[in-house]
Amino acid sequence: MNFLEEKILQDGVVKPGNVLKVDSFLNHQIDVALIDEIAREFKRRFAGKPVTKVLTIETSGIAIACAVAREFGVPMVFAKKSKSVNLDGEMYVAEIESYTHKKVNRVVVAKKYISPEDHVLIVDDFLANGCALQGLISIVDSAEAEVEGLGIAIEKGFQEGGYRIRNLGYHLESIAIVDSMDAETGKIIFREQI
Ligand code: 5GP
């Protein structure tokens, strides 16, 4: 069992509706040493990739993405949720359905922060149905930049996002993959990884 799986078993809480609460170390209070370890693990798993930018989505991806960007020595960019209808053509835009809030967010990234020369590592805290990652991929595509890989802290392997993204041919790495979890018993089972 790896360090993140151990932490999830220790402090994660399974909620009804297939939601795993990790507020005590990842989503509200943040265990900074754990975030640094996640970042080093991504540096190892994406070793040799010519990453020039790390991209995530606000809010909960930001802490992990900062630590990953520091490991690679590159800037971190986060897609911002935007209510504005008057987008001035200076922004890449994607519509992303939020798994936890069940609503559609429009997210934007200023064009000046991702350019065709960029090699982008996309990072997020969770992967469920894959909407967040697909939105971020579409932003990189709009910039005509390259997606070098996608790094996720916790993948819910019983939802289809991971299958979809890997099927599209992307290099997706998840540090912990939850294959099943039960809100009544609190039991969490992880996928074996080599
Ligand atoms: P997706 O777009 O893959 O369906 O969902 C990914 C996003 O939803 C992540 O950015 C994350 O913030 C949120 N999310 C999805 N499932 C969970 C969950 O079980 N627990 C928490 N804390 N966030 C989740």
Image (spheres, rainbow, N blue to C red):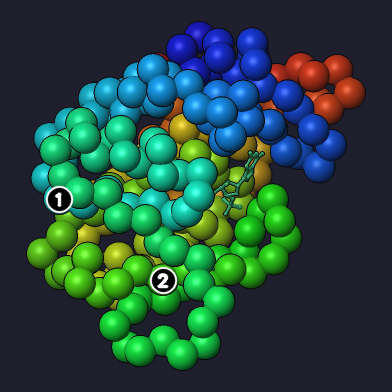
Question: In front here: 167 or 150?
Answer: 150
**151 left or right of 30 in image:** left
- The percent position of residue 48, horizontal first and vertical second, equals 12, 35
Q: How many marks?
A: 2
Number of the label disc, if any, that sits on residue 52: 1
Placement of the C terminus among the 4 image quadrants: top left
Residue tagged 2? 108
Find residue 137 and report its horizontal and vertical position in percent: 38, 62
User: Which one is earlier in the sequence, the residue at label 1 or at label 2?
Assistant: 1
Q: Does dot 1 land on a helix, a strand or a loop?
A: loop
Work out whether 194 lies above or below 177.
above
How much space separates mark 1 and mark 2, taking CA atoms?
A: 19 Å
Circle 2 packing at 10 Å, graded few (<14), some (14-19), many (20+), is many
Q: Residue 190's mark? A: none
Q: Give the side of residue 94 with respect to residue 14, left or right.
A: left
Is 131 left or right of 40, judged from the image as shown?
A: right
Q: Residue furthest front?
A: 29
Tell me where residue 175 appears, x and y as whole percent: 44, 27
Q: Residue at horizontal 20%, vertical 49%?
A: 75
Amino acid found under the numbered disc labelled 2: Val
Observer-nearest of 33 and 175: 33
- Of tags 1 and 2, the one toward the viewer is 2
* Residue 46 shows in the view: no
Q: Say what amino acid the circle numbered 1 marks.
A: Thr
Q: Is residue 93 visible?
A: yes
Q: Is residue 17 above or below residue 52?
A: above
